[in-house]
Amino acid sequence: MSHAVFEKLKRAMADSGFDALVALSPDNVTYTAGFMVPSQLTNRFRRAITILTGSGFACQIVVTVEEDLARERSRFDDVRAYDQFSQMAADVLADALIEAGVDAGRIAIELDFMPAEDLIRLTERLPKARFEHARDIYFKTRMIKTDSEIATLRKVAALTERVIGEAIDAIRPGVTEAQIGAGIMGAMLEGGCQAVKYQVGSGIRSGITNCSVSQKPIERGDIIRVEILGDMDNYRSNVTRTAILGTPDKEQRDIWRTLIGARDQCEAMLKPGTAVADLYRTYATACRADGIEPTLKFLGHGIGQTIHEEPYLAEARDIVLQVNIMHTMEPLYMIPGRMGFHVEDMYLITDRAHEKITGDVVPNDRLIEIGG
């Protein structure tokens, strides 16, 4: 029986007039096949490929060392392996496309990921085929989550919010950013994640947008930003909280009030049919009214197989919200060399409006005061 993901992708492929759809990136191969090919992430010479056609042909191509795992875990009944030392994966792909009868067709393929030597070889083997971007098909299809995807995202989101609360509770003067990070790592893995990334920035380091941890001890008066990105069964979470060790001053309170006020205006707009560009414009206008220029040119992003998916909540996007879109909103304001402010939560668009997936267990409507 064809998997629901196959059917979604085949409908999108047909709507765009393509004869075949080929994925090569780890996230899109994983989305299609239903499992991550482990060595694709760590060895750039090991290709993993999925193929779907409108006529019903479907197969996955993996390197020989991953063949047994793929046969056990892939959604594809047809798994084909190649020897990385004596074969080119592009040749196996070309053979499959010929077998499927689309060698002179219009083929959607990940041109923004595919190695140049593979594309050259493929065009040599299939000179009559037209190769075009598969990017929009995957972005738009992945944007609308299935019930099983939503269930996994809920689970990893709940774990992440709990752990970020525990991390903040553990902050004391003299504790280092690295120590806080180590606690986050352990708790996320023990909670069921297969991988985790995190950021802890305190004091002037809180003003670095992507602040990897350091050995800096946390001191009284420090603004502290904690961000956790979990990976559970190939689905991600993204939750951020901002706290202060002590009591915020007027400037800090005013900045936070502006960010949260802008966020609240946007939360009220979260429902099917809302244009993402309108969300960003509302956010930016509210911030600018109080003299704050948003640091990021987007308010949030879709989340699923990767941390950043469509829809980006950005003025440049012409997407409207739809039921079963999972996304974040992350008001962020950096003052380099001084301090930074950032809150991020996950949301699900429902048929009525939206559901806030995180934010109730560890709210950040006010700056979290530690030992104030």
Image: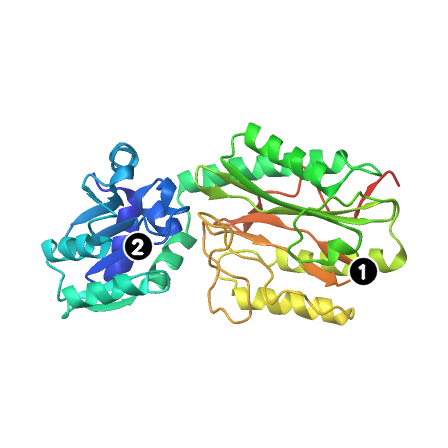
Q: Earlier in the sequence, mark 1 or mark 2?
A: 2
Relative side of 223 to 306, left or right: right
Residue ranking furthest to the front? 85
Residue 74 appears in the picture as rendered: no
Mark 1 is surrounded, within 10 Å at the Cα level, by few (under 14), some (14 to 19) or many (20 or more) other residues, namely: some
As shown in the figure, which amino acid type bears the numbered disc 2? Ala
Task: Residue 335: give x, y in percent of width and height.
Answer: 76, 63
Judging by the rendered image, the residue that carries numbered circle 1 is 338
Task: Residue 353: give x, y in percent of width and height.
Answer: 54, 51
Q: Quick check: marks 1 and 2 in contact, CB under 8 Å?
A: no
As shown in the figure, which amino acid type bears the numbered disc 1? Arg
Q: Compared with residue 71, is residue 127 higher up or lower down, i.e. above or below?
A: below
Residue 165 appears in the picture as rendered: yes
Pick the residue in front: 48 or 287.
48
Relative side of 197 to 128, left or right: right
Give the number of callouts.
2
Judging by the rendered image, the residue that carries numbered circle 2 is 23
Residue 251's quadrant in the figure? bottom right
Q: Quadrant of the N terminus?
A: top left
Relative side of 214 to 301, left or right: right
Pick the residue in front: 215 or 187.
215
Task: Residue 301: give x, y in percent of width and height.
Answer: 53, 57
> What distance separates the C-alpha of mark 1 from that of mark 2?
44 Å
Mark 2 is surrounded, within 10 Å at the Cα level, by few (under 14), some (14 to 19) or many (20 or more) other residues, namely: many
Could you tell me which secondary element the residue under label 2 belongs to?
Answer: strand
